[in-house]
Image (cartoon, grey):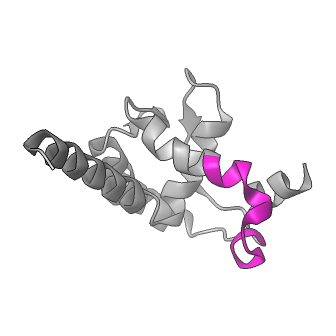
Amino acid sequence: MTDAGVEHATGAVERWNRVFEAVSAEPRRQLVVSLLDASADRSVSLPESAINPNVPPDPTTLRYELVHCHLPMLADMGFIQWRTEPFVASRGERFGEVAAVFEALHDDADALPDSLVVGCQRLERERRS
Protein backbone atom coordinates (compact mmCIF):
# COMPACT_ATOMS: atom_id res chain seq x y z
CA MET A 1 0.00 0.00 0.00
CA THR A 2 1.30 3.46 -0.84
CA ASP A 3 1.90 6.17 1.75
CA ALA A 4 -1.24 7.94 0.51
CA GLY A 5 -3.22 4.71 0.88
CA VAL A 6 -2.01 4.23 4.44
CA GLU A 7 -2.83 7.85 5.22
CA HIS A 8 -6.39 7.46 3.86
CA ALA A 9 -6.89 4.20 5.74
CA THR A 10 -5.59 5.73 8.97
CA GLY A 11 -7.92 8.70 8.55
CA ALA A 12 -10.91 6.42 7.97
CA VAL A 13 -10.05 4.36 11.05
CA GLU A 14 -9.86 7.53 13.17
CA ARG A 15 -13.19 8.82 11.81
CA TRP A 16 -14.89 5.49 12.63
CA ASN A 17 -13.36 5.54 16.11
CA ARG A 18 -14.81 9.03 16.68
CA VAL A 19 -18.25 7.97 15.44
CA PHE A 20 -18.39 4.92 17.71
CA GLU A 21 -17.08 6.89 20.68
CA ALA A 22 -19.75 9.51 20.03
CA VAL A 23 -22.57 6.95 20.06
CA SER A 24 -21.30 5.02 23.09
CA ALA A 25 -23.52 6.95 25.55
CA GLU A 26 -27.31 7.16 25.56
CA PRO A 27 -27.66 10.96 25.88
CA ARG A 28 -25.42 11.41 22.83
CA ARG A 29 -27.40 8.83 20.84
CA GLN A 30 -30.67 10.51 21.76
CA LEU A 31 -29.33 13.91 20.76
CA VAL A 32 -28.16 12.64 17.36
CA VAL A 33 -31.58 11.06 16.71
CA SER A 34 -33.33 14.27 17.80
CA LEU A 35 -31.18 16.26 15.37
CA LEU A 36 -31.96 13.74 12.61
CA ASP A 37 -35.68 14.26 13.25
CA ALA A 38 -35.30 18.06 13.09
CA SER A 39 -34.74 19.91 9.84
CA ALA A 40 -31.07 20.51 9.05
CA ASP A 41 -31.17 24.23 9.83
CA ARG A 42 -32.96 23.91 13.19
CA SER A 43 -31.62 23.55 16.70
CA VAL A 44 -33.14 21.27 19.33
CA SER A 45 -33.78 22.14 22.95
CA LEU A 46 -31.71 20.62 25.71
CA PRO A 47 -31.82 18.64 27.89
CA GLU A 48 -35.13 17.30 26.48
CA SER A 49 -33.57 16.21 23.20
CA ALA A 50 -31.00 14.06 24.97
CA ILE A 51 -33.49 12.09 27.08
CA ASN A 52 -34.66 8.57 26.37
CA PRO A 53 -38.31 8.74 27.45
CA ASN A 54 -38.17 5.08 28.49
CA VAL A 55 -35.34 5.79 30.95
CA PRO A 56 -35.86 9.26 32.42
CA PRO A 57 -32.67 10.52 34.11
CA ASP A 58 -32.17 12.83 37.04
CA PRO A 59 -32.45 16.27 35.35
CA THR A 60 -29.69 17.89 37.42
CA THR A 61 -27.23 15.08 36.73
CA LEU A 62 -28.09 15.01 33.02
CA ARG A 63 -27.58 18.76 32.60
CA TYR A 64 -24.21 18.53 34.35
CA GLU A 65 -23.13 15.57 32.18
CA LEU A 66 -24.30 17.31 29.02
CA VAL A 67 -22.41 20.53 29.74
CA HIS A 68 -19.23 18.93 31.06
CA CYS A 69 -18.96 15.75 28.98
CA HIS A 70 -21.39 14.90 26.18
CA LEU A 71 -21.82 18.23 24.40
CA PRO A 72 -18.13 19.24 24.43
CA MET A 73 -17.19 15.80 23.09
CA LEU A 74 -19.69 15.94 20.24
CA ALA A 75 -18.71 19.54 19.45
CA ASP A 76 -14.98 18.75 19.47
CA MET A 77 -15.68 15.98 16.96
CA GLY A 78 -17.57 18.44 14.75
CA PHE A 79 -20.88 16.56 15.06
CA ILE A 80 -22.80 19.32 16.83
CA GLN A 81 -22.73 22.95 17.87
CA TRP A 82 -24.29 24.01 21.16
CA ARG A 83 -24.84 26.92 23.48
CA THR A 84 -26.23 27.45 26.96
CA GLU A 85 -28.47 30.51 26.40
CA PRO A 86 -30.78 29.21 25.17
CA PHE A 87 -29.69 25.67 25.96
CA VAL A 88 -29.78 24.15 22.46
CA ALA A 89 -27.78 22.05 20.01
CA SER A 90 -27.64 21.98 16.21
CA ARG A 91 -25.88 19.95 13.54
CA GLY A 92 -22.15 20.46 13.16
CA GLU A 93 -20.07 20.34 9.99
CA ARG A 94 -19.34 16.59 10.40
CA PHE A 95 -22.85 15.61 11.56
CA GLY A 96 -23.32 13.47 8.44
CA GLU A 97 -20.66 11.03 9.64
CA VAL A 98 -22.51 10.14 12.84
CA ALA A 99 -25.95 10.49 11.24
CA ALA A 100 -25.09 7.86 8.61
CA VAL A 101 -24.85 5.17 11.30
CA PHE A 102 -28.35 5.92 12.61
CA GLU A 103 -29.85 6.24 9.16
CA ALA A 104 -28.47 2.80 8.24
CA LEU A 105 -29.84 1.28 11.46
CA HIS A 106 -33.23 2.91 11.01
CA ASP A 107 -33.44 1.85 7.37
CA ASP A 108 -32.75 -1.78 8.29
CA ALA A 109 -34.56 -2.00 11.64
CA ASP A 110 -36.32 -5.21 10.57
CA ALA A 111 -32.96 -7.02 10.37
CA LEU A 112 -31.88 -6.05 13.90
CA PRO A 113 -32.30 -8.49 16.79
CA ASP A 114 -35.23 -7.79 19.09
CA SER A 115 -32.80 -7.29 21.96
CA LEU A 116 -31.58 -4.09 20.25
CA VAL A 117 -35.01 -2.87 19.13
CA VAL A 118 -37.45 -3.46 21.99
CA GLY A 119 -37.35 -0.41 24.25
CA CYS A 120 -35.84 1.85 21.59
CA GLN A 121 -38.77 3.99 20.45
CA ARG A 122 -37.27 5.08 17.14
CA LEU A 123 -36.34 1.53 16.05
CA GLU A 124 -39.70 0.19 17.20
CA ARG A 125 -41.43 2.88 15.14
CA GLU A 126 -39.29 2.03 12.09
CA ARG A 127 -40.30 -1.64 12.38
CA ARG A 128 -44.00 -0.74 12.45
CA SER A 129 -43.85 1.46 9.35
Q: Nearer the viewer, residue 12 or 128?
A: 12
Measuring from the top left, give residue 123's x and y in whole percent: 75, 58
Task: Look at the image and tell me whether residue 42 can be seen.
Answer: yes
Q: Is residue 59 above or below residue 108?
A: below
Does residue 64 appear left or right of residue 121 in this picture? left
Q: Position of residue 7 (x, y in %)?
A: 15, 45
Q: Does the magenta segment cover residue 108?
A: yes
Please report the residue visible at 40 percent of the width from the left and 40 percent of the height from the top.
79
Question: Which residue lies at the image location 45% right of the left edge and 66% below the top edge?
Answer: 24
Could you tell me which residue is drawn at 90 percent across and 48 percent down? Answer: 129
Q: Which one is nearer the viewer's eye here, 92 or 18?
A: 18
Which residue appears farthest toward the front when viewing the image? 1
State the residue lying farthest toward the right: 128
Against 1, residue 38 (above or below) is: above
Quarter-of-image position of residue 51: bottom right
Residue 19 located left or right of residue 110: left
Q: Position of residue 31 (x, y in %)?
A: 55, 49
Above/below status of 38 relative to 18: above
Picture coordinates of residue 64 (x, y %)? 39, 60
Give the dominant element type of the magenta stretch: helix, strand or loop.
helix
The answer to whether any part of residue 46 appears in the image is no
**Residue most toward the top?**
41
Which residue sits furthest bottom?
A: 115
How many marks overall? 0
Give yes or no for residue 15 being in the magenta stretch.
Answer: no
- Region of the chain picked out in magenta, as a range: 104-118
- Eyeballing the image, is 57 above or below 50? below
